[in-house]
């Protein structure tokens, strides 16, 4: 079993432990480590790295692309929400990595004010599942105000590790 899958399974279990989390911010989301172009915060959660000139790391750029391929139809452009689904640029401030993975993989149903909202499960959709970390870091960057609306102006080159992970997950 790949490290990514083990991490994903463990992350799915974390929300069940009932740990409370303070709202995310730029300080908590700051990159503390770099593993082959993939950044992690001090707690080991995937995060973004945006340079002074606006260059984003590959995974944040990939997350932007994947978000606008599969998620923006319901959640609105750049995660700002719609009449159909919540603003992820706000929601992401208050959910942890494990909760995010769980919701994306398993889906979710919310009932409130006589209205039912359903987030479909994407755990079987490789175009989403294989890029969940990318989606997470992009939306996290939007949530804490590090990434502005719009296509990132510059991106880092795609690391070999990202190419290898993509080929492994997509089966190619």
Image (cartoon, rainbow, N blue to C red):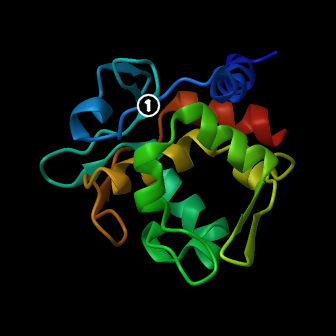
Q: Residue at x 54, y 80 (%)?
A: 82
Q: Nearer the viewer, residue 153 or 69?
A: 69
Q: Can you tell which quarter of the image residue 39 is in?
A: top left
Q: Image quadrant for the C terminus?
A: top right
| Residue 47: x %, y % from top left | 40, 35
In the rendered structure, the answer to whether residue 58 lies left or right of residue 172 reads: left
Q: Is residue 62 above or below residue 148?
A: above
Q: Residue at x 70, y 49 (%)?
A: 104
On screen, residue 153 above or below 5: below
Question: Image height check: is 18 above or below 83?
Answer: above
Q: Residue at x 33, y 62 (%)?
A: 152
Q: Is residue 41 left or right of residue 16?
A: left
Which residue lies under the disc numbered 1? 21
Q: Residue furthest front?
A: 113
Location of residue 72 by image quarter = bottom right
Regarding mark 1 in the picture, which secondary structure is present there? Answer: loop
The residue lying furthest to the left in this view is 52
* In the displayed structure image, the side of residue 115 where residue 90 appears, left or right: left
């Amino acid at each position: 079993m790949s490290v990514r899958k083990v991490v994903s399974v463990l992350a799915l279990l974390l929300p069940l432990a009932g740990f409370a989390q303070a709202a995310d911010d730029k300080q908590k989301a700051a990159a503390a480590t770099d593993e082959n172009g993939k950044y992690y915060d001090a707690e080991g959660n995937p995060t973004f790295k945006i340079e002074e000139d606006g260059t984003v790391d590959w995974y944040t750029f990939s997350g932007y692309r994947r978000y606008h391929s599969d998620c923006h139809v319901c959640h609105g452009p750049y995660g700002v929400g719609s009449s159909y689904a919540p603003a992820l640029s706000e929601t992401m401030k208050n959910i942890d990595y494990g909760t995010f993975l769980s919701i994306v993989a398993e889906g979710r149903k919310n009932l409130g004010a006589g209205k039912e909202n359903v987030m479909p499960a994407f755990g079987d959709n490789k175009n989403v599942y294989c890029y969940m970390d990318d989606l997470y870091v992009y939306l996290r960057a939007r949530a804490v105000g590090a990434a502005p609306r719009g296509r990132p102006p510059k991106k880092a080159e795609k690391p070999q590790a990202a190419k290898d992970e993509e080929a492994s997950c997509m089966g190619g």
